[in-house]
Structures are given as structure tokens and as C-alpha cells.
């Protein structure tokens, strides 16, 4: 069996603050194979975007990687010089952010922005070849009349079109892994479905692996092969997406499903999870979910539960001794 494309082991990321270090990621381990889509899901402030940023080498001061390892294509990314990391970004790794307006340069045409990637990473390509690739990429992401549209500026396009351009940029150099951080959150439902279809199609066509960061379980259920549910900087449940979402074991995953309006059966009653995510400068002792957990017992405050496979399905793991 070939080595996984990505292996994250015991990753810890913290941010300095006047109140002490904020542990945004507190020991996350994940594995991702080629041609798979892994969803990272959880409420805001649970560390899922930070995992994506750490992978892309985008953690900036006052943040730092406090421990663990990220191995991509069997090479450790931790401590890689910025020049090497910049070469990997775009070429083998790329990222799609939530807001295409912030990602695209307003003073460059969309065609020039994509062409810039080829000039930087593929300097041997001729101008005409680059133009043909740019047009082909725009067509592939569903931009109609691509040869004319490549001369448009970002402000001349709709939000959905801009996000397609961002996806074209992410795909330009045929990376092995794309991190998509809430790529459809800013879009209306119809465009959201089109963009998710596009991501799925591109993944199966090119064999690209995708990490999809989302707070939306519906998006994860529709798009992902596997899911990792994050709470307070840790993975609390993981496994095949259909298995985890159909038979959640961790009270937090069950709570996320219960709190989503249109997820599950037609007679589904929405029940929000009481309370809020904890302050990661002072996380609760033991299981960080205990102040919100309806199943908590006194022992839940004693130790941080480890992620362990369940007996019936070894690919399904849960960090709750009572649920496992
Ligand atoms: Fe709830 Fe305890 Fe399980 Fe944490 S360990 S999820 S508090 S039952």
C-alpha cells in the first residue's frame, strides 16, 4: 500500500496572548490519501482553519507551531525554509479561502492573476501556451466565454464567478492537495451547490486530495469521503463521513447534527447545543466538552479522552470513553 499523501501527527499550534498561550490546536493527528476529500467540521474557534493554515505554512506571529509534525509527500513541512514552502504552495499545495474578494488582486485581470502562477512556477512556458492554459482553466471551472472573460477584473464578476476564478488559481499547477477553507460560505445556496459539484468533479478527474474546512455538516455530508469533527483544538470523532454522520458516537457530533435545521429526518427537531466553545487560553480540565455535555459524569473532568476506534467499525474513532 502506498504511503499517505499527508500525515499530521500530534500537531499543536498556540498563540501568545496577555492571558497566556491560546491552544488553538492541541494535538491533532490526521491522515489523508490521494483522491480523497476529508472534511474538518466544528463550530468557529475549534481550530479547524488553524490546521489548514499550519499545513500551508501560514501561521504568523503571535502564533507558532508548538509541536508535532506535518509530513506531505513524505517530507516534513515543519521548519521548512520559507523559500521552499513558497515553492510548494501553488505547485503541490494550494488553498481556497472563503472570500474571493480578499484573495484576488483588484488591479489585475483574472487572466493575468492565473498567468502569474505559471510565470512564477513554470518560467519555461511560452506566453501563448500560458494564455491557452488560462483559458482552458477558466472553461474548466465553468466561466462562459472564457477567452474574453480572462481580460475582466475581479469587480466585473459576480461572487460565484470570483470563487470559480479562485478555484482556477488553486488548480492551475495541478497540486496534489487543496485546502478549501469555507469555500462556499459567502455564496448563495444555488452557487454553493455548483461550486461543491465542481470541487468533487475536479477531485475525481485529477485525483487531487482535498481538505474541506466547514462549519456546515450539510456541505460535509454532500462532499466528503471522510470527516474529522473538531472541538476545542482536538479531533473528537473521525471516520468515513457517511458512517460518522449516520451513527455519531460523540455527544458533540450528535449535538452538531441535532442543531442543524435541515439535516436528518423530515420530522427533525432543531436542538442547539447549550453553552459556547471554551476559552482556549483556559480550557476546562479533562474533556473540554464536559460543561456542555448532557452525558457528562464526574470522571469526565479527570483526563482528556483519547481518540480510539470503536469495536464495530475500526475506521470510526471517538474521543469519549462513555460513547465508545
Ligand atoms: Fe461528554 Fe464525558 Fe464523553 Fe466528554 S467524555 S463527551 S463530557 S460523556
Image (spheres, rainbow, N blue to C red):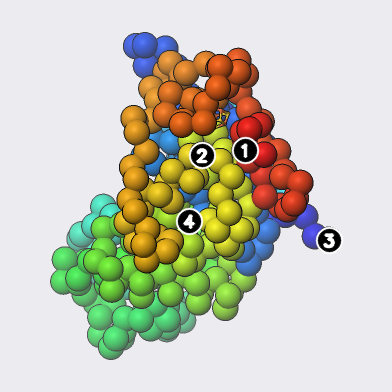
Find out if the beta carbon at label 1 lies less than 8 Å from the nearest ligand 1 atom: yes
Judged left or right of residue 311, residue 147 is: left
Which residue in the rendered view is the most extreme toward the front? 267
Q: Is 101 rendered above or below residue 249?
A: below
Q: Which residue is drawn at 34% across and 45% down?
A: 271
User: Which residue in the structure is indicated by mark 2?
Assistant: 251
Find out if the beta carbon at label 3 lies less than 8 Å from the nearest ligand 1 atom: no
Q: Residue at x 26, y 63 (%)?
A: 187
> Alpha-carbon distance for marks 3 and 2?
34 Å
Query: Can you tell which mark lies on residue 323?
Result: 1
> Alpha-carbon distance for marks 3 and 4?
25 Å
Q: Can residue 207 be seen in this view?
A: yes
**First of labels 4, 2 by sequence position:** 4
Q: Are marks 2 and 1 in contact (CB under 8 Å)?
A: yes
> Nearer the viewer's eye, disc 4 or disc 1?
1
Which residue in the rendered view is the most extreme toward the right? 1
User: Which residue in the structure is indicated by mark 3?
Assistant: 1
**First of labels 3, 4 by sequence position:** 3
User: Which residue in the structure is indicated by mark 4?
Assistant: 212
> Nearer the viewer's eye, disc 3 or disc 2?
2
Q: Is mark 4 on a helix, strand or loop?
A: strand
Amino acid at each position: 500500500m502506498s504511503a499517505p499523501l499527508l500525515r499530521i501527527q500530534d500537531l499543536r499550534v498556540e498563540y501568545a496572548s496577555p492571558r497566556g498561550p491560546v491552544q488553538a490546536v492541541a494535538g491533532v493527528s490526521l491522515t489523508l490519501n490521494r483522491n480523497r476529500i476529508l472534511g474538518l467540521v466544528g463550530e468557529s474557534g475549534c481550530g479547524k482553519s488553524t490546521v489548514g493554515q499550519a499545513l500551508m505554512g501560514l501561521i504568523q506571529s503571535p502564533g507558532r507551531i508548538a509541536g508535532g509534525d506535518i509530513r506531505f509527500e513524505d517530507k516534513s513541512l515543519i521548519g521548512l525554509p520559507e523559500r521552499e514552502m513558497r515553492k510548494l504552495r501553488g505547485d503541490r499545495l494550494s488553498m481556497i479561502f472563503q472570500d474571493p474578494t480578499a484573495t484576488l488582486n483588484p488591479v489585475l485581470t483574472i487572466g493575468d492573476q492565473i498567468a502569474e502562477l505559471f510565470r512564477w512556477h513554470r518560467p519555461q512556458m511560452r506566453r501563448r501556451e500560458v494564455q491557452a492554459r488560462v483559458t482552458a482553466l477558466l472553461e474548466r471551472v465553468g466561466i462562459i466565454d472564457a477567452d474574453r472573460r480572462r481580460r475582466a477584473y475581479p469587480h466585473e464578476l459576480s461572487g460565484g464567478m470570483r470563487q470559480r476564478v479562485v478555484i482556477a488559481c488553486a488548480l492551475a499547477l495541478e497540486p496534489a492537495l487543496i485546502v478549501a477553507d469555507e469555500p462556499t460560505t459567502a455564496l448563495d445556496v444555488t452557487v454553493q451547490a455548483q461550486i461543491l459539484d465542481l470541487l468533487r468533479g475536479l477531485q475525481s478527474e485529477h485525483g487531487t486530495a482535498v481538505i474541506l474546512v466547514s462549519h456546515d455538516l450539510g456541505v460535509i455530508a454532500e462532499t466528503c469521503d471522510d470527516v474529522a469533527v473538531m472541538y476545542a483544538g482536538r479531533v473528537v470523532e473521525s471516520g468515513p463521513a457517511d458512517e460518522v454522520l449516520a451513527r455519531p458516537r460523540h455527544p458533540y457530533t450528535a449535538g452538531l447534527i441535532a442543531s442543524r435545521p435541515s439535516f436528518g429526518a423530515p420530522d427533525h427537531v432543531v436542538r442547539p447545543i447549550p453553552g459556547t466553545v471554551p476559552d482556549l487560553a483556559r480550557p476546562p480540565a479533562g474533556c473540554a466538552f464536559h460543561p456542555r455535555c448532557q452525558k457528562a459524569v464526574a470522571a469526565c473532568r479527570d483526563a482528556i479522552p483519547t481518540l480510539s476506534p470503536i469495536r464495530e467499525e475500526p475506521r470510526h474513532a471517538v474521543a469519549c470513553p462513555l460513547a465508545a
